[in-house]
Amino acid sequence: MRCFRCAASGLFVLIFCIADTRAETPTSPPLPSPLRLLPDQADLLIQVPEPRRLVESLTTGDLLKQLQQIAAIREISDSTNAHRARQLLAYFEKELGLPWPQLLDRLAGRGIAAGFRFGANPADVLLVIEGDDDRLTQQFFQLGMTILEQELTRQESKEKLIKGTYKEYTTVRLGTQFHASVAGTALFLGNSEKALHAGLDRHQNSGKKSMAEVTGVREAAQLLPPQPLVSSWLNVEKLIQSPGAKAVYKSPPRDDPILTIGVGHYLDLIGRSPFVCAGIYREKDGFVATFRLPCGREGMGADKFLSVPPAGAPGTRPLLKPKNVLYSESKFFDIANIWKERDKLFNEKQARDLDAFEKKAAPFLIGTKFSKLLTQAGPYYRFVAAHQSKVDYKTTPKISIPAFALVWEMREPEAFAKSMETLLRGVALLAGSQVNLRIVEEKYKDSKLIGYRFPEDQPFKGDVNDLRFNFVPCFTRVGDQFVVSSTMELCRELVDLIQKEGSTPTRGQDLATRMSLFGPGGAAYLQTIEDLLVTQTTLDRAETPAEARQQIKGLFDLVRGLGELALESRFQDKSFQYDIRLRLNSVARPQTAQKER
Amino acid sequence: MADTSATSIDPRWAWQTYRPSKDAPWDLPRVGHLYRRAAFGGTYSELEAGLKASPEALVSQLLKGGPGQAEFDAEMAPLAQNIARYNDAAHMRAWWLARMLHSPNPLQEKITLFWHNHFATSYAKVQSARFMLAQYELMRRHALGHFPELLREMSSDAAMLIWLDGRDSKKGNPNENYGRELMELFSLGIGHYTEKDIREAARAFTGWEIQGTKAVFSPKQHDDGAKTVLGQTGNWKADDIVRICLEQKSAAPFLVEKLYRFLISETVSPSPELLRPLAEQFRNSGYDFGALVKTMLCSNLFFSPQVYRTRIKSPVDFVLNIVRPLEGKIGATALALSLEQLGQNLFSPPSVKGWDGGRSWLNGQTLLFRQNLALALSSTEDARFGRRCDPAELAHKYHKETDAELVDFFLRLFLQGDVSAETRTRLFDYQQHAHKLPAPVYWTQQDIADHRVRSLCHLVLTLPEFQLD
């Protein structure tokens, strides 16, 4: 396994090295896949169809340049290991007579594929790297083995490379967990003899089945968009075979109701899907990783009542993006069904407990029934967090906490808003007996904002950092949306945004979830904790505070340039899709550099 | 390092100021010994300069501290404020370690570490970096000052009030924890007080509470009735109990012995006769700890072969005695995390008694961790430390090129050359043999040479002698 770890870290370091030695060449056309050389028993498959395109995708663009401006990253790139990796690369280039881009094409142009078979510990692994030049592959292999041998001698290792043969192939073994061979244009690396032999058998065309013939792998290729940088396929059926897993990956009721409420829809999907596949793609302004399952809304059990928009229903509302937004989320979650469909979602005892809770909660809900609150609420909610550039108090808190708000769509706006107002006023009254909160009411546009302020002339036990002055908890109603916010300023901004989107905002078809983290807002928030970051950098990296501050400014630029990390889930009748998308801002130069100019 | 008794040591000779002689010359091993015990190891140039100074002058210099203390404190203070504000425990540990590494007054930090082990307050219960750092500051301020002042202020220190439940000690319901530890661990030692003394003392410590960021005395919560403690009766408050404890004959010997074990020897057990002159001096000086430290560091006994390498390096000493001599620019956060693995998590002693120290520092696991950490620090190949602590670079700096020069350099740097001829030969042979080992073909000659230097350095750090202080 150590050799595999070394290979993985070596690859990482090589990418950094390659960043410094990029070359301009056109993209190669798609080539046959080495999948045919992997035995069909693999449970996890990872493929890099065009290694050259992957490396170039990672090493071109502003992101890497910006990363290299961070001192900690630069230090990795200047490390002894990185230095040696660059020397190693240069040595291969010299000995094999080609620069690395051509070497990569000739040695791995047909792709890299790795298969993992679970069950044994460690799992059986076979890696196949296939190019189009058998002579060069053989040379590369010999050179690699020579270097490995030298490294073993240098370390005075007791382990030696042992040569052998399997059928007509020459094999090399180191210990019990490193096995390698070259067959034609393919290089095989395995962590067991069995795995290596299985690969060589496929090369010999012995009639044994390969991963290229596995139905699920073919279906996955159809489900995923074309031309991934990296793709993978996971045999889910095998993974969830254990009795414990079977109890979780099934339709409700489950032993743990929290699982049902939180992630029940995902558990149901995984329980029904034969596989999960994923791909990473380069997009115009960044990268996307997409996960796909060949099962969707159809056939889903009671979990469909909570987090899955019914067929024909609109998808989630658009994300709210107030000024300095850090995080925004918009989800479908039909909270009413927790009550209405409780007999299907929960077991008998859990449903009884819910009934009992309604009775117990009645005195605390001040005349409102728990079930009524649930059923009056709508199935769409949004949550947003934003950096506060200023607080609503004269006293500035010693630690800044981002403002945040929950916006819930109401089925019965009048009734729900009334129930919530009574409830929240009651809660504030109760809190007031401990904290002495002052109520403030404000008319803003067509909404009435009701908020609560902390007195500034009274101490508050335990709040040594004046954290309370980050908050003016408040609530309001905007049409069919109910807003609960941690500050009045954010609440006002949300009123504006909700009014602007109107009653029929654009909604993504089939979208069940949208979540986004925003770089510029993140950078603005990080600036509020600059002193802490400077302290940590000073101590982590043995810098002077002035040097650390300079480095932190580089970090702010990097975070700002990251743009947006967006997560979206989409339920279709027969499939499910989860995308994680990084949209990079086009940052020409860091701000600190601009200032210097 | 066998345990021995110091009954045969003449107390008069022992505490007289050491004067270099033909039999006991002022040599590099003695300079290194002083830098290990009174600091956290010396750099090559510090050791060489120390050799040129007199022992007394070097001790005085260590007691006084180097130039730039005010600037250093001014640079570190805002970092502590931020750590306190964000209650950042990991960086709190790193902050102190950075102070130990870079302070112009390492002896002050070392004695503060002694007090930290003496008062043994843990963040695990206090849960406030602000209070832990305030306690550190209190200990550092009085590290080489008068003990009664330190003990008086410690009795109302916020971290201590939480650690030993003083904040919950109210009139009518006194908590005995602080009173007990004050007598047992902080001033007198077991056998010099009764349970009744503890109960009565606990009443005197009632009334302290924490408001916001401060410890505040609340007269309403204080038991102002008469108490009898160690034979003295009166309407005693916290300060009175501290005074009464320090008036006891057992107080000075108790503290002197503890410092003896810290500065002089863990294995040569001191007889009461040996410590008596120091205890008398200590008591008569009004418990002037700086004077006591100076007497010990200047003494014949301190520089004698009897106590040489008779302590096992604590994890803090082990780590800093690598990084300081190598002149590494290493981030203290990763070092502080490593200390946890070695068994000395700063600001988190394992119990009210502190770390046991001595042989308990070493077992199969911690020894392995020490070897691995030494490799990580000296190889330049570990991601935590990178090339920030490079023995090869240091050897270039001091123009050490040949095998003999390199072996001599690292032995002088870490062990002041004080190893057996056999060890030296073994190292030299290793270095010679290393030339014959084939290196990967893609390495340059410089890579190969640097790698040999780093490996040699690591080998020196794994010698058994290096585990000793």
Image (cartoon, rainbow, N blue to C red):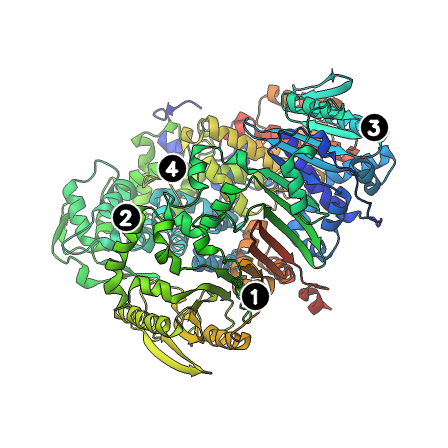
Q: Nearer the viewer, residue A32 or A526?
A: A32
Q: Which of A588 and B442 is in front in this view?
A: A588
Q: Distance between the residues labelled 2 and 4?
A: 17 Å
Q: Which amino acid does label 1 sit on?
A: Arg
Earlier in the chain: of badge 2 and badge 4, it is 2
Q: Distance between the residues labelled 4 and 1?
A: 63 Å
Horizontal and vertical percent for residue A450? Answer: 37, 77
Disc 4: which residue: B355
Which mark lies nearer to you, 1 or 2? 1
Disc 3: which residue: A139
SS class, disc 3: helix
Q: Answer yes or no: are tags 1 and 2 on the same subunit.
A: no
- Above or below, A242 against A518 in this view is above
The answer to whether the residues at label 3 and label 4 have Cβ atoms under 8 Å apart is no
Disc 2: which residue: B164
Q: How far apart are marks 3 and 1 (CA)?
A: 57 Å
Horizontal and vertical percent for residue A582? Answer: 63, 56
What is the number of the mark on residue A507?
1
